[in-house]
């Protein structure tokens, strides 16, 4: 089976927000959607699934109108859209066995019991739950429940599969297993999928295209790699794990607002150096691991500052102050201020350098590791405070 | 941690006195009733013609009333549970009125509605149908007092389950009826069963509304509670039969209690 195409313009008015999103997917395509909580991702999925009504716009699934608002109002009920939604909570029917849960969709569409049960048994095998057919969901672990929910969704042969943070409620190791299962089954069934996630790893490993949704609008979209390497907003940069610092253009270089930090970007193909007039806003992008950090000779912040006034830093080097230390799986992330930049270090380096909040440090980033991108007008104003990188808790 | 290791409590000890008095007030009269039962003639008392006819009539009418409550109460509970919050609160209050209203008042109200000069009674009389003082009136009175029990029990169960499972069923392609039969009702089955049992128990015990609206005609409207009342306040029913029927109602009540409790732990969550 192969999924159908999605072509939607969803406008839903919520109490706090107007969601206005255009989204499309080719048959069999997997599109990842990321955005801060409350940005309207779940509202978007609910509208496409038929659980929420459109205020304006239209939804076409597999070349058929599922919802329109003009010239006539049409709302095909959820049960007849062929769209299945899988959310954080799998919502398995607690009174039915695993087999009956998976057979529920086909049975509801009039498939004969023996046929539906046989298909369900095959799905139980495909998601790695052999011999669990007669068990009730309450007896399963969170990961196993999510497997059943995936099987139950795919058993209906949906035209469109909506995954709303399916890996959020389970532990990291299990999430890895489920991610692998999703990868295999989505490839095998070629079902068109929208995947909402807060984890760039999900987008990178499952989807080809990534849409960033913020405050009810599409903030950025494109191939996953492109969006993650040149994030256009503060949120996208956080999600991609990249430092995104806003400054201004001056002579083809990036200069921080206070003029103290100058960064040159790698030259050559691609997005190295956009044509931006002097004084226009510019974003510098570089990975926390690409930043070198050392202690300056002067041990106090005032002494270091005095020295800086005498002897300005060369391009790609600047003096900063440690704001916060954060543990990461690989060691530590050091957050520095003015401009706010995150630096990844091994844990032993943190100890060797004697880092603590308030300590002055010298940062250096090679031009080859910096990308410079123009800033869309809408993204400038509140984001003059530059990107701060945080690892989101699972 | 064993129970004996826990600190006893933090309440004033003197509260135990009114508590025990209260409990005694509830239990001692019933114990006295059981003590008054003439065990030697119990079987004869229950099988006395007046008792048998009251017994049969009670169970027949209570079953009919429960069936009517199921047919009307399930849709009503569904409607309340899935209404917007404010509408639901108003409807819930309306359903609760008969529960707290003295049944006598209900009987009077029914009489005014179905009486010969009532709104509905007049129209029905033109069709040759007379409702008050018939077995039908007994059933109607029982439905009036018992329906809230079923509706409130089921509605609470429906509301706490929420609509997430129904949404899941819908996106899996289940239509409204399939969702109702295969998801909504099975998930609220504990509430439904508790509601049906309570509803039946209330119908069997109904007295006030029945007495006013249906009267006390042996074999037609004289249910067990009315027979008991007659035994102590009128004629035609022996006191031994009254006591025996009271015992029967007490046993029914205890059985209902056990049934409802037995269903609670089964609730799937």
Image: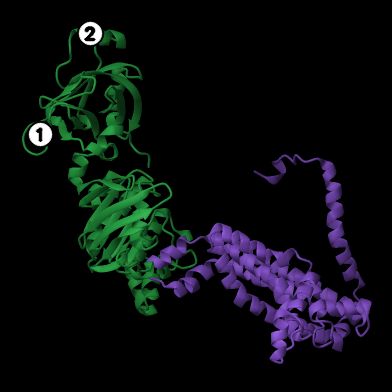
Chain colours: A green, B purple
- In the rendered image, residue A278, in percent from the top left (x then y), is placed at 13, 26
**Residue sitting at the far bottom:** B128
Between residues A362 and A36, which one lies in front from this camera angle?
Answer: A36
Report the disc number at residue A275.
1
Does residue A343 sit above or below A181 in this rendering?
Answer: above
Q: Are marks 1 and 2 on the same chain?
A: yes
Q: Is residue B138 left or right of residue B80?
A: right
Report which residue position mark 2 lands on.
A307
Q: Is residue A310 left or right of residue B7?
A: left
Q: How many marks?
A: 2
Residue in the picture at 26% in, 11% down: A305
User: x, y percentage for residue A192?
Assistant: 25, 61
Which chain letter goes with mark 1?
Answer: A
Using a 10 Å C-alpha cutoff, classify the residue at mark 1 as few (fewer than 14 neighbours), some (14 to 19) or many (20 or more): few
Check the image and report above or below for B262 versus A18: below
In the rendered view, tell whether residue A85 sits above or below residue A258.
Answer: below
Disc 1 element: loop
Residue at x 29%, y 10% (from the top left corner): A299
Specify whether residue B269 is in view: no
Q: State the residue at coordinates (87%, 58%).
A: B25
* Image vertical order of residue B160 relative to residue A252, above or below: below
Residue B171 image point, x, y percent: 38, 65
Along the polypeptide, which appears first: circle 1 or circle 2? 1
């Amino acid at each position: 089976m192969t999924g159908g195409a999605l072509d939607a313009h969803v406008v839903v008015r919520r109490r706090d927000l107007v969601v206005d999103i255009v989204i499309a997917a080719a048959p069999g395509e997997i599109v990842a959607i990321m955005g801060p909580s409350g940005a309207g991702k779940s509202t978007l999925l609910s509208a496409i699934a038929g659980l929420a009504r459109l205020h304006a716009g239209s939804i076409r699934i597999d070349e058929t109108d599922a919802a329109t608002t003009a010239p006539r109002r049409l709302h095909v009920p959820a049960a007849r859209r062929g769209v299945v939604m899988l959310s954080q909570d799998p919502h398995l029917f607690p009174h039915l066995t695993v087999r009956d849960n998976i057979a529920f969709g086909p049975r509801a569409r009039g498939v004969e019991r023996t046929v539906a049960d046989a298909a369900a048994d095959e799905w139980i095998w495909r998601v790695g739950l052999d011999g669990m057919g007669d068990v009730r969901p309450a007896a399963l672990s969170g990961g196993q429940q999510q497997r059943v929910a995936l099987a139950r969704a795919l058993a209906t042969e949906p035209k469109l599969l909506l995954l709303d943070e399916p890996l959020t409620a389970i532990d990291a190791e299990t999430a890895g297993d489920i991610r692998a299962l999703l990868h295999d089954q989505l490839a095998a069934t070629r079902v068109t999928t929208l995947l909402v996630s807060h984890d760039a790893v999900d987008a990178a490993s499952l989807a080809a295209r990534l849409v960033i949704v913020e405050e009810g609008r599409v903030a950025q979209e494109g191939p996953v790699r492109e969006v993650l390497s040149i994030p256009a907003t503060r949120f996208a940069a956080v999600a991609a794990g990249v430092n995104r610092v806003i400054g201004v253009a001056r002579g083809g270089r990036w200069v921080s607002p206070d003029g103290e930090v100058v960064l040159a970007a790698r030259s050559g193909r691609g997005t190295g150096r956009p044509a931006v007039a002097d004084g226009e806003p510019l974003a510098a992008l570089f990975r926390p691991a690409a930043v070198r950090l050392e202690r300056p000779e002067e041990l106090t912040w005032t002494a270091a500052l005095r020295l800086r006034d005498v002897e300005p830093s060369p391009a790609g080097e600047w003096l900063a102050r440690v704001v916060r230390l954060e543990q990461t799986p690989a060691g530590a992330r050091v957050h520095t201020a003015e401009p706010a930049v995150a630096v990844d270090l091994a844990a032993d380096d943190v100890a060797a350098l004697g880092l603590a909040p308030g300590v002055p440090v010298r940062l250096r980033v090679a031009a080859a590791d910096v990308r410079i991108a123009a800033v869309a007008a809408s993204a400038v104003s509140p984001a003059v405070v530059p990107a701060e990188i945080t690892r989101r808790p699972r | 941690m064993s129970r004996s290791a826990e600190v006893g409590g933090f309440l004033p000890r003197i509260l135990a006195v009114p508590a025990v008095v209260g409990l005694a007030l509830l239990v001692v009269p019933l114990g006295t009733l059981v003590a008054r039962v003439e065990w030697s003639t119990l079987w004869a008392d229950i099988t006395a013609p007046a008792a048998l006819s009251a017994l049969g009539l009670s169970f027949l009418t209570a079953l009919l009333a429960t069936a009517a409550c199921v047919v009307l109460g399930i849709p009503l509970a569904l409607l309340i549970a899935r209404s917007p919050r404010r509408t639901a609160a108003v409807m819930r209050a309306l359903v609760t009125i008969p529960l707290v209203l003295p049944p006598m008042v209900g009987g009077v109200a029914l009489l005014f509605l179905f009486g010969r000069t009532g709104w509905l009674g007049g129209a029905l009389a033109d069709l040759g149908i007379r409702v008050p003082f018939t077995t039908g009136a007994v059933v109607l009175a029982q439905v009036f007092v018992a329906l809230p029990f079923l509706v409130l029990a089921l509605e609470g169960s429906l509301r706490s389950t929420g609509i997430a499972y129904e949404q899941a069923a819908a996106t899996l392609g289940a239509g409204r009826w399939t969702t109702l039969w295969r998801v909504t009702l099975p998930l609220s089955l504990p509430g439904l069963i508790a509601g049906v049992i309570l509803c039946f128990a209330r119908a069997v015990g109904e007295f006030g509304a029945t007495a006013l609206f249906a009267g006390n005609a042996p074999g037609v409207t004289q249910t067990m509670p009315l027979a008991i009342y007659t035994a102590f306040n009128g004629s035609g029913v022996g006191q031994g039969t009254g006591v025996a029927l009271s015992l029967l109602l007490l046993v029914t009540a205890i059985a209902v209690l056990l049934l409802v409790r037995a269903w609670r732990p089964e609730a799937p969550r």
